[in-house]
Amino acid sequence: MLLNKVVVGRGYKLTGNKSSLTAPPAGYDSVSIIVRLLFGGALTKVQVLGEVGGRLNHDELVVYDNDAVRPSYLVMYDTPE
């Protein structure tokens, strides 16, 4: 497994899926998600990266430039035989 460092730059925040994007909107470098969470009975807007809900079921941040991703660690697992 590779653990990477990612340069987010100026992130565009979405409130739902937009799978048709092939690039970030003009002036942005990446795309993240804004979801609505319930805190103490009040509906609150909170920025998270891929909070479970809608069609997302895991953390997600989209960058469109390969140079924004830098491998940092290689994690290797060994199973007993």
Image (spheres, rainbow, N blue to C red):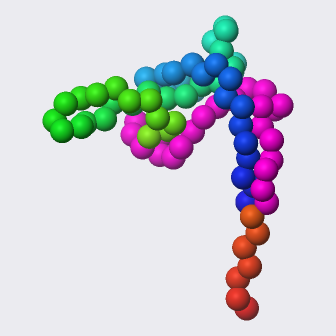
**Magenta segment, which residues?**
52-74
Residue drawn where x is 47% and y is 46% of the image? 57
Residue drawn 72% across the image and 52% down it: 3
| Vertical relation: 35 (above or below) 11 | below
- Residue 73 sits inside the magenta stretch: yes
Q: Residue furthest right?
A: 67
Q: Report whether residue 59 is seen.
A: yes
Residue reaching furthest to the left: 41
> Which residue is painted at 51% across and 21% down in the image?
13
| Residue 58 on the magenta span | yes
Q: Quadrant for residue 76, please give it.
A: bottom right
Q: Nearer the viewer, residue 22 or 58?
A: 58
Q: Which quadrant of the structure image shows residue 67? A: top right
- Asked whether 44 or 15 is in front, the reply is 44
Instruction: In the displayed orientation, state which residue is furthest to the bottom.
Output: 81
The quadrant in which residue 15 appears is top left
54 shown above or below 29: below
Residue 37: x and y in percent read 31, 35
Locate the C terminus and report the quarter of the image it occupies.
bottom right
Residue 74 at what x, y percent from top left? Answer: 79, 60
Q: Nearer the viewer, residue 68 or 57?
A: 68
Q: 28 left or right of 68?
A: left
**On-image quarter of the N terminus:** bottom right
Please give left or right for residue 52 compared with residue 70 in the image. left
How many discs mark residues in the rendered view? 0
Res. 55 visible in picture: no
* Relative image position of residue 43 (x, y in whole percent): 24, 29
Query: Residue 24, relative to residue 68: is it above or below?
Result: above
Identify the residue at the far top of this view: 26
